[in-house]
Amino acid sequence: MRIPRGSAFTLLSIATGIVAALAVGTTWFPMMRERQRQALDDQARELELVGLLAIDRLRDALAEGSTPLLRPPPPSAVDIPPAQEEVEEIRGRAEEVLSEITELADVERILLVDPRGRLLGATPPRPPSVYGDIVPDPAIDACGLGEVIEDRRTVRATLRAPSQPLRQVICQPLRQAEGGPAIGMLAIVGRGEATILATRQGGRELLLLLTAATVAGLVTVAGMRRLLAPLTAVSRAAARIAAGERGVRVEPRGPQEVQQLARA
């Protein structure tokens, strides 16, 4: 490999810049990933708490009356959709609860579906004609309805869309009682501000790192320039002597080895 031509000072300056850039990159990128991960973890815990609160209130609201509005699906393979009157009553009670939760928790949206995936409640509300039907939604698809309903466990997923920040969704089973079968699923979609704030904070940290690296680089370059100045003077004097000039003198300064070379 051919080494680039140039003065030692130039080569060392380039090396210093490369080292500074690598130092910033290896410091900032892991820090940024960790900050975003922590922001998403914090948001996920908040969404889970919001879901537990919503489920507790929904359970009470939908259990009012002699017959619960939401019941476990029948064991048979026959899928019997709920009557439209029942869907309207569930929607009215559910969305009253979900609207309050959405305002308190400042989430993007909340969806309530039955074990088959039919929409029973949503905030913000959907067109009336879609309630009682299976409505495609990225939040439902990301979690997996069967995994939440059949396994009766909370699922955390992420939503990615072009030109939009990364968002999270928490899906939780809705049960009539603790340990019982799932009678529905609640999907809570968080806002993308969590990752936006983490990115902004990371940008400020990057600016600080770049400033520190620039200052360190300038100090290093200034030190190298001071260190190499006597050697540069000796090199120029040697070139003048080689050209036949007489009486060339160099002031001895710098490290002892360079001073000895200047006297010679």
Image: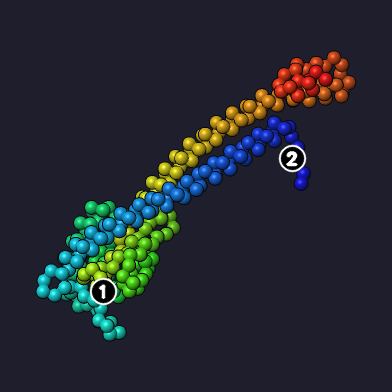
Q: Quadrant of the C terminus?
A: top right
Residue position for label 2: 4
Q: Position of residue 185 (x, y in %)?
A: 28, 68
Residue in the image at 34% along x and 56% along y: 44
Q: Horizontally, is 33 left or right of 98 in the view?
A: right
Which of 251 and 135 lies nearest the eye of the viewer? 251
The label on residue 192 is none
Q: Is residue 100 or residue 67 the one in the foreground? A: 67
Q: Which mark is residue 181?
A: 1
- SS under mark 1: loop
Q: Nearer the viewer, mark 1 or mark 2?
A: 1
Q: Mark 1 or mark 2, which has the lower sequence index?
A: 2
Image point (11%, 71%), residue name: 65
What colour scheme governs how the chains and residues are painted in the rendered image of this protein?
A: rainbow
Cα distance between the residues tagged 1 and 2? 72 Å
* 203 relative to 43 in the view: left or right: right
Q: Is residue 100 left or right of residue 212?
A: left
The residue at 20%/73% (across/down) is 70
Residue 27 location in percent, x, y? 52, 43
For residue 198, side relative to residue 117 (left or right): right
Q: Is residue 182 visible?
A: yes
Give the SS element for disc 2: loop
As drawn, the residue found furthest toward the left would be 66
Task: Please report the residue visible at 21 percent of the width from the left and 69 percent of the height from the top.
Answer: 177
Residue 13 in which image quadrant: top right
Q: Tell me if residue 51 comes above or below residue 241 in the rendering.
A: below
